[in-house]
Amino acid sequence: MRLLRRVLLTVLGLQVLIAVTMSVVDSYRKRGKKPVAFPTTAPTTVEVGEGTITTYTYGRDLYDDMIAAIEGAKRQVLFETYIWKGDRTGERFKRALAEAAERGVEVYCIYDGFANLVVSPVFKRFPATMKVLKFPLYAAGWRFFDLRGYGRDHRKILVVDDTVGFVGGYNIGDAYETEWRDTHVRITGPGVWDLKRAFADFWNLHRRRRLRHSERPLLLETASTWESKIRVQRNVPRLWMFPIRAMYLEAINRSSRNVWMTQAYFLPDQDFVDALKDAARRGVDVRLLLPLKSNHIVADWVSRGYFSQLLDAGVKILRFKGAMVHAKTATVDGTWSTVGTANIDRLSLQGNYEINLEVIDPGLAATLEKIFLTDETNCAPLTRYEWEARDLHRKFTESFLRPLGRIL
């Protein structure tokens, strides 16, 4: 047993060492590289139930509308983000939020402490008129072995008054504005209330501080109407709730025509892979759109460990060229759609605080299918011949690093 433990620890150590080395080398190679243009789709609005959903695929369009909403706020702004860079774009949002608070609007902000470790402490000083909650770097307290305390706040939400809400994959920063291909949506109507509740529930769950004064609870009225076509699915590790994975599996298992997915990081469990394979084998058009090279090279290599079985089953793998595709979207059978913050990996589906819209509406599905086809024009399809012809050292590295997928 002692020898076995040593062997396992040695293998794990080598995996981590290789992963760290790859990340360092990749960061060095990317220095000085200029951003590459990529196709985008203009903001498109469709009616869904008693409201609307507008889809964005370019950061500048999204940021302009988000800022306009904040500037037009009359009563309340709820703003939550995973990454909030201290650059020009980050300052633009900070200034708009501060000005809203100065004119008497209630402004609540949440950002993740770990994701913003490298952001200047000066930027993270906010006016007293703003209510700001930094999700702590370590939230487990004295319960070191309680896994519910280790999830990050990976959500991105903006809600203004009771009229408009935004949710999707975009963080806040200069690079995301023009260099990354992501997807976000703007919603109006009764569905906005579900985003408000999602924000308030998170705020109230984490508002108590150990070393500083606690924030006041955020109390909301009860919405008088429900939007039957929109559901807000939330992963809440503190409560051991992870419905987003089940949402995906249910939709894939019910598919009969097509499953088109765009994912930034694809590190699924075997049950998820099997669901996609089963769909493809029964004749469903299953397409998986991933970045050719993401901002996390280790995730790319681990992800490739699933490609052989997916290609064997008939799943089409498309690799987005030139830019980082960070979207987390899917459509099924021209009816079901999801847009949100959760990646297909263990951290998102079984670890982090995440939020996805689940929408049953042909209009939004058609919009996302159009976006998918536009993105596909910038993709390199992965053929079976190309995959089998890769070098031996690549096959070894993929197999050696694949176990890391259980912790990523």
Image (cartoon, rainbow, N blue to C red):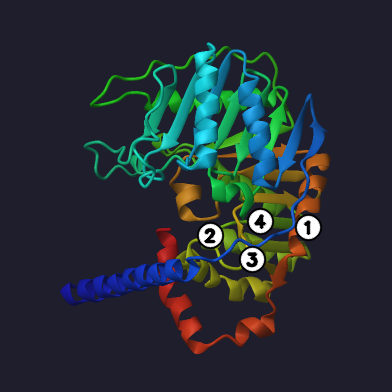
Quadrant placement of the C terminus? bottom left
Q: Are marks 1 and 2 in contact (CB under 8 Å)?
A: no
In percent of width and height, residue 201 lies at 48, 25
> Does the rendering let one see residue 363?
yes
Q: Are marks 1 and 4 in contact (CB under 8 Å)?
A: no
Give the SS element for disc 1. Answer: helix
Q: CA distance from mark 3 to mark 2?
A: 24 Å
Q: Amino acid at mark 1?
A: Thr
Q: Amino acid at mark 2?
A: Pro
Q: Earlier in the sequence, mark 1 or mark 2?
A: 2
Tell me, for residue 268, which label it has, or none. 2
User: Residue under circle 1?
Assistant: 374
Q: Residue at x 41, y 76 (%)?
A: 400
Q: Residue at x 65, y 83 (%)?
A: 386
Residue closest to the eye, 390 or 180 = 180
Asked if residue 301 is positioned above or below residue 374 in the image, the reply reads below
In percent of width and height, residue 379 lies at 71, 67
Q: Residue at x 37, y 24 (%)?
A: 207
User: Residue under circle 4?
Assistant: 262
Q: Earlier in the sequence, mark 1 or mark 4?
A: 4
Q: Earlier in the sequence, mark 3 or mark 4?
A: 4
Check disc 2: other Cα within 10 Å, few if <14, some if 14-19, many if 20+: many
Tell me, for residue 322, which label it has, or none. 3
Residue closest to the eye, 117 or 186 = 117
Check disc 3: other Cα within 10 Å, few if <14, some if 14-19, many if 20+: some
